[in-house]
């Protein structure tokens, strides 16, 4: 090595060694030596105010000074930097408190805001904090994250939070906060996330929210905000997610939302919004979920929504939308859930959605399709049978008519689990050629993806999981299922004009949980093959023209908790063995040729038939309110049976049917059902 290079290397090594020595012999000047002690004492004072942190098992057990003889440095002894949930900078000052889900019970009244001026983040979510948020929080001027969510904090949001100019994340959701959003929050120009949902907040939304230029996600759902949505929110061009559902917001959706080009989710459901759906929403090319259900929106569905090719969820149900379903919706190839039910939509399903090859056939991901409670006049859209992932098809309460013809494919509707065509004008025989091919109702293994072991129907988009919901008729009651069990399989053709026999092949649908063929013109006898539906929980064949005797084989349906054979032309003695002996006379009334227990006759029933059951499409709100209490009482009994039965079916599928457990729980369920019936 050359001498000059060697000399240079020696100088460098000497300088480095000198620097290392300085690190040890020169005290840090950024924070006085006693600062850590003061911070520790302040934190311990707050700990002493908490209600459950004195035990050795508490999460803050490490928050304590060790004995004085444990070390020779008072500065290190007094430092809180090694305590649970505490982070410090190189100077030894506390910069972070991260103690979520730690069973901390108490208030923030003694929290040492004035002693922790270097704090950059506080995460105390999912504890048991109560009381107010102190205005002294404004002293933490270096704070970038404040998460006090999932506690029991009350009172108002202090306007002093608006002085935290470095704040990027503010999570106060799932508390008991009241009052309004302070205007001062609009000063937080670096705020990226604002979560205030599920509190008791109200009042108008401040226009100052339009100043939060860095905001990417805002969620204020499940409060009582009223008034209009500020037009200024259309200026927040960095917004990616908006959630305002479950409030009292009025007026139209701001057309300025059409400028939010980064928006991926827009949820303004369950409000009182009026006017039409802004055409400008068709510009949001990144939008994946658009949820506007249960408002007072009017007008037609904008055809420009067909440009939202990333859309996976479109909920426009429970509004007053009218006109035809736009043909352009067939362009939404990424669509998984499309719900347009409970509107005033008319006309046929658009041609692009109705004849092969058409655009909706390309929507290979579509799983849930609900057009119920509209005024759609069309034939059965048999072309939907080619959609490979369709699990839920609900066309209830429309003007569909004609026969139930099928597409010319080997296995139509390969994954279908819920088929509801009730309350339409379908005619002709029951579609045996459809029934025999419903693979999703014949076997769980063919009806589900092999790797899907989830208890509920769900799909994943990005990092979020979304569980499907739907409204179905169960045991004579219309009930909304917020989540759908993967083994919930139903077939409903009630309230039509179908005729002919019930085909024997219906016994192939082994995993059916519910079957409703009531209020048709079916004739012939009840097929004994129904006994092959071993998972059946409810069976409704009422108000038809069925004749002959009740098959004894139905008694083998050990899961059956609801049976309605009333208003037919059945004859003979009612079988009394097994499950059939558990039902009341309501299950058999109106069959003049039936006799025996539980009917009050020995040979024939000449009693007056019961009043005709109400139409499932009844829209009389007064009548609906009057029956609310009865629905609650009866529903509890029915629902318990459904939950127990389906849960057992799920256990059986997962680990093999434990017959002894099934028998025990079914016995308990039958006793409970009898008790509920007697209590009526």
Image (spheres, rainbow, N blue to C red):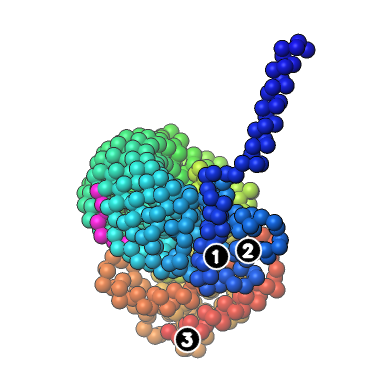
Q: Which of the two residues, 612 or 15, is positioned nearer the viewer here? A: 15
Residue at horizontal 46%, vertical 52%?
A: 117
Q: Nearer the viewer, mark 3 or mark 1?
A: 1
The residue tagged 1 is: 44
Label 2 crowd (10 A; few <14 / some 14-19 / many >=20): some
> Can you tell which mark lies on residue 515?
none
Q: Is residue 202 magenta?
A: yes
Q: Residue furthest top?
A: 2
Residue 30 in view of the camera: yes
Which tag, 1 or 2, sits closer to the chain's start?
Answer: 1
As displayed, is residue 675 above or below residue 627? below
Image-quadrant location for residue 472: bottom left
Q: Which of the two residues, 96 or 563, is positioned nearer the viewer here? A: 96
Which tag, 3 or 1, sits closer to the chain's start?
Answer: 1
Give the image location of residue 182, x and y in percent.
29, 55
The residue tagged 3 is: 678
The tally of labels here is 3
Query: Tag 3, which secondary structure?
Result: helix
Q: Is residue 596 magenta?
A: no
Residue 352 in view of the camera: no
Q: Is residue 219 left or right of residue 643?
A: left
- Mark 3–mark 1 Cα distance, whole angstroms, equals 61 Å
């Amino acid at each position: 090595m050359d001498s000059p290079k060697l000399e240079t290397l020696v100088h460098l090594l000497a300088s480095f060694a000198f620097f290392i020595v300085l690190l040890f012999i020169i005290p840090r000047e950024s924070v006085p030596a006693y600062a850590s002690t003061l911070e520790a004492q302040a934190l311990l004072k707050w700990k002493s105010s908490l209600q459950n942190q004195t035990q050795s098992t508490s999460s803050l057990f490490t928050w304590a000074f060790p004995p004085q003889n444990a070390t020779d440095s008072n500065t290190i002894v007094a430092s809180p930097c090694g305590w649970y949930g505490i982070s410090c900078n190189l100077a030894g000052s506390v910069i972070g408190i991260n103690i979520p889900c730690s069973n901390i019970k108490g208030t923030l009244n003694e929290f040492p805001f004035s002693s922790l001026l270097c704090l950059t983040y506080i995460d105390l979510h999912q504890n048991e904090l109560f009381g107010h948020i102190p205005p002294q929080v404004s002293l933490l001027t270096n704070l970038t994250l404040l998460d006090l969510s999932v506690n029991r904090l009350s009172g108002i949001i202090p306007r002093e939070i608006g002085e935290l100019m470095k704040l990027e994340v503010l999570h106060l959701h799932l508390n008991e906060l009241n009052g309004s959003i302070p205007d001062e929050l609009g000063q937080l120009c670096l705020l990226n996330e604002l979560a205030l949902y599920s509190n008791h907040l109200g009042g108008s939304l401040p226009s100052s929210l339009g100043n939060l230029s860095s905001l990417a996600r805002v969620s204020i759902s499940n409060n009582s905000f009223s008034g209009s949505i500020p037009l200024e929110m259309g200026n927040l061009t960095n917004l990616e997610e908006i959630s305002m559902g479950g409030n009292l917001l009025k007026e139209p959706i701001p057309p300025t939302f059409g400028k939010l080009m980064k928006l991926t989710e827009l949820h303004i459901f369950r409000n009182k919004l009026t006017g039409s759906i802004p055409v400008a929403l068709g510009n949001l090319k990144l939008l994946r979920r658009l949820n506007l259900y249960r408002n007072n929106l009017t007008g037609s569905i904008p055809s420009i929504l067909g440009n939202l090719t990333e859309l996976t969820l479109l909920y426009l149900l429970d509004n007053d939308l009218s006109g035809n379903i736009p043909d352009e919706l067939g362009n939404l190839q990424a669509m998984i859930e499309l719900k347009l039910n409970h509107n005033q939509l008319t006309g046929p399903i658009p041609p692009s959605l109705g004849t092969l090859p058409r655009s909706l056939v390309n929507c290979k991901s579509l799983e849930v399709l609900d057009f119920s409670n509209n005024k759609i006049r069309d034939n059965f859209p048999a072309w939907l049978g080619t959609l490979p992932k369709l699990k839920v098809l609900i066309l209830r309460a429309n003007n569909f008519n004609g026969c139930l013809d099928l597409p010319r494919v080997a296995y139509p509707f390969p994954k279908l689990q819920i088929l509801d065509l009730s309350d339409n004008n379908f005619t002709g025989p029951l579609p045996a050629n459809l029934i025999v091919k419903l693979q999703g109702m014949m076997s769980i293994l063919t009806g589900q993806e092999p790797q899907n072991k989830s208890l509920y129907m769900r799909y994943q988009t990005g990092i979020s999981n979304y569980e499907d919901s739907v409204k179905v008729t169960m045991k004579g009651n219309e009930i909304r299922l917020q989540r759908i069990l993967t083994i919930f399989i139903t077939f409903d053709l009630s309230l039509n004009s179908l005729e002919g026999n019930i085909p024997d092949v219906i016994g192939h649908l082994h995993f059916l949980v519910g079957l409703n063929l009531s209020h048709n013109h079916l004739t012939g006898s009840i097929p004994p093959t129904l006994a092959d539906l071993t998972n059946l929980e409810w069976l409704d064949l009422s108000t038809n023209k069925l004749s002959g005797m009740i098959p004894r084989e139905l008694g083998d349906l050990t899961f059956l908790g609801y049976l309605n054979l009333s208003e037919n032309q059945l004859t003979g003695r009612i079988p009394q063995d097994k499950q059939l002996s558990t039902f009341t006379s309501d299950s058999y009334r109106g069959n003049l040729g039936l006799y025996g227990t539980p009917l009050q006759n020995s040979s024939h029933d000449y009693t007056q038939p019961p009043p005709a059951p109400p139409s499932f499409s009844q829209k009389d709100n007064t009548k609906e309110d009057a029956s609310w209490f009865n629905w609650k009482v009866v529903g509890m009994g029915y629902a318990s049976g459904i939950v127990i039965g389906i849960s057992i079916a799920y256990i059986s599928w997962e680990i093999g049917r434990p017959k002894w457990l099934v028998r025990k729980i079914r016995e308990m369920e039958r006793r409970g059902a009898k008790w509920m019936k007697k209590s009526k």
